[in-house]
């Protein structure tokens, strides 16, 4: 299998196959191209270092996306918290950046902390990571129907906690 082959050629082929959509999906979550480029580089370094971590139980793209979105969230966590929609450089933050910050620091963070780990994992995979129900099911190792029912429960519990 290609992912298990740690040769430079295998990594180059994975990069060429997946970099385009990865950049596009990350750009939807972060408007700073420099940050996205760094996250993409970190993602493929993670793919290289952790090739043995891919068990082949789902699409390689879902595995790469999981690494990429975690790298982006880690990057947001290291940034200072902007006030009133502006970051430390004076540039206006995107709506998604503000939501991610709310998840980390605001009322939404407290509400999410109140969810069970199972509900929180589904919510992060589908809402924050942008995975489809099928991709989330593969990533989390649960049936698609379970993803859907946990999502409904998570939404209901979040609505109650934020009301």
Image (cartoon, helix red, strand yellow):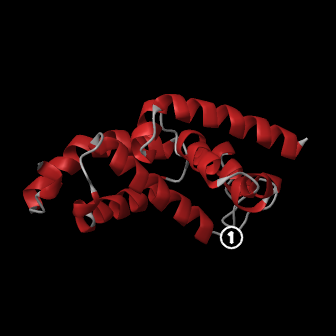
Query: In the figure, is residue 94 to the left or right of 156?
Result: left
Q: Give the position of the C terminus as an image quadrant.
A: top right
> Which residue is more in the foreground, 16 or 86?
16
Residue 16 is situated, as x and y percent measured from the top left of the image, at 20, 45
On the picture, is 20 further left or further right than 133? left
Residue at point 40%, 56% (across, down): 67
Question: Residue at 66% across / 65% down in the picture?
Answer: 89
Q: Is residue 84 above or below residue 24?
A: below
Q: Between residue 162 and residue 101, name the one nearer to us.
A: 162
Q: Secondary structure at mark 1?
A: loop
- Is residue 12 in view from this perspective? no
Residue indicated by mark 1: 80
- The quadrant where residue 44 appears: bottom left
Question: Callout 1: 10 Å neighbours few (<14), some, many (20+)?
Answer: few
Q: Residue at x 70, y 36 (%)?
A: 153
Does residue 34 show up? yes
* Quarter of the figure with residue 78: bottom right
Position of 54 with respect to 23 (left or right) is left
Quarter of the view holding residue 61? top left
95 in relation to 68, above or below: above
């Amino acid at each position: 299998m290609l992912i298990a082959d740690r040769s430079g050629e295998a990594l180059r082929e994975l990069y060429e196959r997946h970099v385009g959509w990865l950049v596009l999906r990350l750009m939807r979550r972060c408007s700073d191209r420099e940050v996205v480029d760094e996250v993409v580089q970190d993602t493929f370094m993670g793919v290289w270092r952790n090739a043995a971590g891919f068990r082949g139980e789902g699409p390689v793209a879902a595995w790469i996306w999981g690494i990429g979105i975690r790298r982006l969230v880690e990057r947001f966590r290291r940034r200072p918290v902007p006030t009133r929609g502006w970051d430390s450089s004076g540039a206006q933050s995107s709506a998604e950046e503000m939501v991610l910050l709310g998840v980390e620091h605001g009322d939404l963070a407290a509400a999410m902390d109140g969810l069970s780990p199972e509900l929180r994992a589904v919510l992060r995979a589908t809402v924050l990571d942008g995975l489809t129900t099928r991709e989330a099911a593969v990533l989390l190792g649960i049936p698609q129907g379970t993803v859907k029912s946990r999502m409904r429960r998570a939404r209901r519990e979040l609505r109650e906690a934020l009301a």
